[in-house]
Image (spheres, helix red, strand yellow):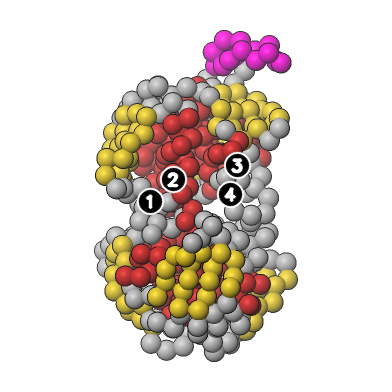
Amino acid sequence: MKQYVIHGGKPLSGEVFISGAKNAAASILPGAMLINGICQISNVPRISDVKLTIEIMERLGARVKYIDAETIEVDGRAVQPGTVPQELGSQMRASHFFIGSMLGRFGRAHVSLPGGCGLGARPIDQHLKGFAQMGACNRIEDGMLQVSIPGSQTDEESGNEGKGKLKGARIRFDMVTVGATMNLMLAAALAKGTTVLENAAREPHIVDLAGFLNAMGGDVSGAGTNTITINGVSSLKGGEYRLIPDQIETGTYMAAAAAAGGDVSLKGVIPQHMEYISSVLSAMGMEIEEGSDFIVVRKSNRLKGTDITTMPYPGFPTDMQPQIAAVLCLAEGRSTVRESIWEDRFRYAEQLCRMGADIKVEGRVAVIEGVSKLYGAEVEAYDLRAGAALVIAALAAVGTTKIKHVNYIERGYHDMVGKLSRLGADIYVEE
């Protein structure tokens, strides 16, 4: 067990280079399993979720090796349709993307139900609905999900034998869902015929997944709109691909500068992905300068409170909600944060209140009365983004903060302690 120790009150200054997108890697790495060949993926973040994903890939027969610190080579020629072990798959939500890749390549998948941070229920009904429309059936036993195409394998219970392949279909999601959109894209890449996804999510990492599939010989169009078309191909070839920078990591360091103050340059970013976050921080009083691949944020005066409602992209992302709430704790006036995606995302509020914040939560709404100062305390991270929010609050707080359960933070942030230290923060790891 380790914890972060932060002596707050020091403005941030300097440059920080943003790592590859966690949420892009979450689907693109399983997507490499569709390829009966070798591919190289660069700008891969060195985070624990990626390490876990690679371990699952290797359990399924892939040969994975690092070419350099942020580039991996995946050889999928020996991949077999095995089982994603429960002790691995239950640790992260992204394990469900192996359903799409294994089902697409082999016609069957055996995966534990997804885990990850405790943000509330994680239903995959929209995933299963889409797979069913493409010809697959499913059953759940002992926390394991088996999805298969009748005829794709010998099934002692159903009596199915032989070979099978997914068939293209027109699928309309009942709600906007990032996970199901990406999972169905993976499944449809090698399907017979054309699959059309309607009411699809539009996040940057969905566009990145489409870019990856196309770079490997796929035929995907419409990503970034609410209608995505996938023409199934007979096979995907090897190739090279570079992941986009992490939108949420970028926003987290912007929020850190907003809380602690200072002048921070974020390098290797895509400013267009940050438009909504930048507009919110600008309206609060942050100075923001954008270039082709960088954003500079400055804070000189106390920020003003505002109202936030999380929405699917291009709205304000739910994965930035806790971080912006930490900033609002120190902003002038009253702010309201409404969470429309997850039903249990305000668990961090109690921890911020231990540091002197004034937050009242009712259901999916948090009302924040800005205070002039936060104070160091011993707090606990309950999930990935909540942990980031506590780090942000601690950077601005008077005194020393100790944050427990930082394993959650390291699921999604590469070298956060090192990056913040290089910006002038007084932060270190204590075992």
The circle on residue 50 is 2
Q: Is residue 283 above or below residue 294?
A: below
Q: Within 10 Å of the Cα at label 1, are there few (<14), some (14-19), or many (20+) other Cα atoms?
A: many
Three-letter code for the amino acid on which mark 1 is drawn? Pro
> Residue reaching furthest front?
431
Q: If the image is split into quadrants, where does the N terminus sit?
A: bottom right
Q: CA distance from mark 4 to mark 1?
A: 18 Å
Comes first in the chain, label 4 or label 2: 2
Three-letter code for the amino acid on which mark 2 is drawn? Val
Residue position for label 3: 90
The residue shown at (54%, 87%) is 373
Q: CA distance from mark 1 to mark 3?
A: 21 Å
Q: Main secondary structure of the magenta part?
A: loop
Quadrant assignment, res 263: bottom left
Q: Secondary structure at mark 1?
A: loop
Q: Is residue 97 left or right of residue 140?
A: left
Comes first in the chain, label 2 or label 3: 2
Comes first in the chain, label 4 or label 3: 3
The magenta stretch spans which residues?
151-164
**Where is residue 336 shown, x and y percent of the image?**
62, 76
Residue position for label 4: 116
Q: CA distance from mark 2 to mark 1?
A: 7 Å
